Image: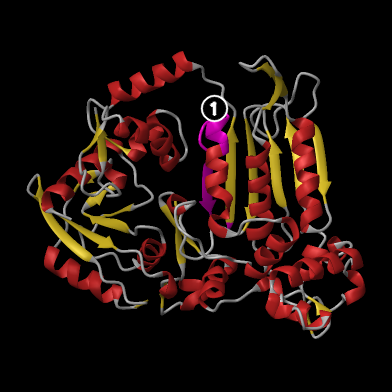
């Protein structure tokens, strides 16, 4: 970064008095901190990397104390960076503030094929870290495995289930699948049934795979009791709140069966617990309008069933659906897979964690594998007049949130005006989200700031770099 940018960043840190997801503070007045490995690792492993700022003392009220020797500090930090795998290459900036020297080290995100970045002295399992808020946390064995699974193209859906036999597959479902498959894939027409099931990942050496059981099994939970969906309706806005009648849950159900059965069972649960309004159209006909568009709900349930992680690390964790007073949440084990990020969802073709399952379901229930159905979800919610969906990706969990439309037009206008008033001084994404009570800056910017940018009511301080860490918005 430029020297002026470092000065502005330091002023911002001091005024807010806190570290953040992308910022770590170190004193370095008496010498270079000896253990930077955890931060070097966590910043290298997180999206867009991070910045270490040397010369600020948190314990002294975020006082600028400067560094002992800017030149030697850079040398010592570089020495520690060389102990990482892959090697970390910090970009240093030196600035003078109040007659004190401040040094920043920008740590770039490493390529996904090099992740996790770890300290060689501790090894991959003990030396890999992830950034959680303003702290560096050791990666779990599963988090490390998820990178390895992508790099080595491991398909956990294809692991065989030794206790199972072909008798555990539904004969009717298998026959119907084979008929549809032969119609659509001419190269398979002359192969016998057993060979076709092998090519499609349903069986290996006459033993059903996990994919085969989850797609066509008579009762997959005989082998994997937790590969199911837990669904509940909560009175209130959080689990644990008591309703007027003293009950926490209005409805609570575990949904089992094959993936097609769980899809229909979960959809039925949502339908049963949604309120439906009857409206009169302009033509004078009556129409039902559910709280959430069924097509969008179906897409996120199907996505969770297809794209959840089916490794041994997560096969004890069900998909979880919760309907609150103000929203619907659906989360599945396994964060976003491969190179895709939350900002990329629906915009680019994503890496597929379970391609054999996705391919089979395209045949079985006419699904679309491309783009994971996200554009459909966004379009359906918009058509229903609901807020944009919220996507959250964190530590092995992917969550989708649908919010009900609780604000009327006047309320929306009040929020817009409040944003414009607040942005008379340039504000960062984090400042905006925190000020208006939103947990996720990305969601707030996408929902509220993006339309204002499009209408030119708000502008960016760095318009040529819209995704810059130093981006601010002003009215």
- The vertical placement of 304 against 117, above or below, is above
**If the image is split into quadrants, where does the N terminus sit?**
bottom left
Residue 250: % across, % down: 80, 30
Q: Which residue is mark 1?
A: 385
Res 461 visible? yes
**If the image is split into quadrants, where does the C terminus sit?**
top left
Residue 444: % across, % down: 42, 35
Q: Nearer the viewer, residue 76 or 277?
A: 277
Range of magenta residues: 380-396
The residue lying furthest to the left in this view is 99
Q: Which image quadrant is residue 186 in?
A: bottom right
Quick check: 3 left or right of 343?
left
Residue 34: % across, % down: 31, 68
What colour scheme has been applied to the protein in the rendered image?
secondary structure
Number of labels in the image equals 1
Name the residue: 81% across, 20% down.
245
Name the residue: 21% across, 61% down.
30
Residue 311: % across, % down: 67, 69
Q: Residues within 10 Å of mark 1 (few under 14, many from 20)?
A: few
Q: Secondary structure at mark 1?
A: loop
Q: Which image quadrant is residue 40 in?
A: bottom left
The residue lying furthest to the bottom in this view is 205
């Amino acid at each position: 970064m430029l020297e002026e940018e470092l000065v502005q960043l330091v002023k911002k840190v001091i005024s807010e008095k806190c570290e953040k997801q992308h910022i770590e503070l170190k004193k370095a007045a008496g010498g270079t901190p000896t253990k930077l490995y955890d931060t070097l690792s966590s910043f290298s492993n997180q999206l867009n990397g991070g910045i270490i700022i040397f010369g600020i003392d948190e314990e002294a009220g975020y006082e600028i104390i400067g560094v002992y020797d800017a030149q030697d500090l850079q040398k010592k930090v570089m020495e520690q960076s060389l102990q990482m795998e892959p090697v970390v290459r910090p970009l240093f900036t030196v600035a003078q503030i109040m007659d004190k020297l401040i040094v920043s080290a920008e740590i770039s995100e490493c390529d996904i094929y090099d992740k996790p970045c770890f300290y060689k002295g501790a090894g991959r399992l003990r030396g890999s870290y992830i950034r959680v808020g303003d702290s560096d946390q050791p990666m779990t064995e599963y988090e490390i495995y998820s990178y390895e699974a992508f790099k080595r193209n491991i398909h956990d859906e294809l692991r065989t289930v030794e206790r199972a036999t072909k008798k555990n597959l539904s004969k009717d479902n298998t026959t119907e699948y084979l008929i549809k498959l032969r119609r659509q894939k001419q190269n398979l027409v002359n192969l016998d049934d057993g060979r076709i099931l092998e090519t499609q990942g349903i069986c290996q050496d006459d033993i059903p795979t996990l994919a085969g059981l989850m797609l066509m099994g008579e009762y997959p939970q005989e082998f994997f009791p937790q590969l199911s969906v837990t669904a509940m309706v909560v009175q209130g806005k959080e689990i644990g709140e008591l309703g007027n009648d003293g009950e926490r849950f209005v409805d609570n159900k575990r949904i089992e069966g094959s993936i097609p059965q769980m899809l229909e069972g979960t959809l039925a649960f949502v339908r049963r617990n949604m309120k439906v309004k009857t409206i009169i159209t302009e033509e004078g006909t009556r129409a039902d309008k559910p709280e959430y568009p069924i097509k969008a709900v179906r897409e996120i349930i199907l996505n969770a069933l297809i794209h959840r992680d089916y490794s041994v690390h997560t096969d004890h964790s069900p998909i979880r659906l919760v309907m609150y007073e103000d929203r619907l949440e659906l989360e599945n084990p396994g964060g976003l897979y491969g190179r895709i990020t939350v900002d990329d969802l629906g915009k680019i073709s994503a890496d597929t964690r379970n391609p054999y399952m996705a391919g089979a379901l395209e045949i079985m229930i006419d699904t679309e594998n491309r783009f994971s159905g996200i554009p459909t979800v966004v379009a359906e919610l918009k058509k229903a007049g609901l807020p944009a969906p919220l996507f959250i990706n964190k530590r092995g969990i992917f969550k989708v949130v649908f919010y009900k439309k609780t604000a009327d037009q006047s309320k929306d206008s009040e929020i817009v005006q409040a944003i414009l008033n607040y942005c008379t001084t340039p504000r960062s994404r984090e400042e905006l989200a925190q000020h208006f009570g939103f947990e996720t800056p990305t969601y707030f910017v996408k929902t509220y700031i993006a339309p204002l940018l499009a209408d030119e009511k708000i502008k960016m301080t760095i318009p040529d770099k819209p995704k810059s860490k130093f981006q601010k918005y002003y009215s």
